[in-house]
Image (cartoon, rainbow, N blue to C red):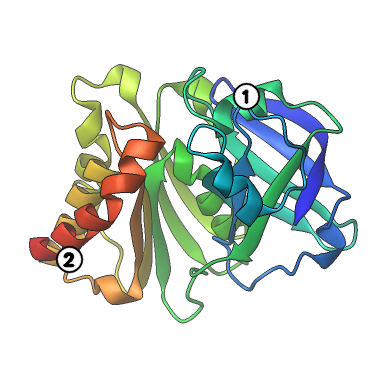
Amino acid sequence: MFAEVLDVERITPGLIRVRFGGGDLHEFESTEYTDQYINGYFVPPDANYPVPFDLDEVRTLGDELRPRPRRFTVRKWDEEAKKLTIDFVIHGDVGFAGPWAKRAVPGDKLQFKGPNGSYSPNPEVDWHLFAGDETAIPGISASVESLGAGSHCVVFIVVDNHEFEIPIHTDATLDLKWLHRDDSTDPSSLLLEAVRNFDFLEGTYDVFVHGEAGEVRELRKYLVGEKSLNPETSSISPYWRRNHTDEAWRKVKKEWLADQENDI
């Protein structure tokens, strides 16, 4: 499946919103999940094959020319207009997806598979806990915005500074806490300390925690070990790892997740 870029918008210094239309989006089947995602395939700069392409065929061209798969949360799907919105986190000119989004102009094409997903806020609980960094903003935003009046959500998001904050709209009661790396002597501990110092509300709750691998792991230890959270009924996983390229992280992620199970 592929789609064409309709427009590109810089949301924050580190977030680019790309809206897609056309292509095969008439076949797009949205899921029930608020964290639904697509797997985009980004063509390396030195490759000269066009989108759409035969994935099995281009994989035979060698490592330097094969398309690089990257997973992105669906920020919004407009069923009536058949338009797809994806927010890209930008980290300079490193990697494939971020630089692609920075260069993107109307008419550019992106091939992808999906969507898939696994999380939606549990309507049976008393409140919802969301925590993560800028990579989790699309999933957190979509989830919070899906909640109606009478719901209560508590959100912790780590970003560099106030310029990286975005508005999140919802009919639910929203306690949103932005945490700034630029104001901290130990940015890697911001998320854990904020949740640790939070007075948990009474009643049942569900959890959505995503972001940097080490930070997510420490927060998972705390929630499972000290708050008796059941990890099997929670959405907790790392999106990236500090001091690792996406390619390097993909190579060790399976082992990391297996070792993480020994934490509890």
Report the front residue among 58 and 109: 58
Residue drawn 30% across and 32% down?
244
Q: Amino acid at mark 1?
A: Pro
Q: How many neighbours does mark 1 have within 10 angstroms: few (below 14), some (14-19), or many (20 or more)?
A: few
Left or right of 73: which side holds 112?
right
Residue 188 % position (x, y): 23, 32
Local secondary structure at mark 1: loop
Left or right of 253: which side holds 143?
right
Residue 247 % position (x, y): 39, 38
Local secondary structure at mark 2: helix
Residue drawn 64% across and 51% down?
57
Please tell me whether residue 123 is drawn above or below residue 80 in the rendered image.
Answer: below
Residue drawn 77% across and 38% down?
50
Q: Quadrant of the N terminus?
A: bottom right
According to the picture, the residue beneath numbered tag 1 turns out to be: 45
- Mark 1 or 2, nearer chain start: 1
**Can residue 166 be seen in this snapshot?**
no
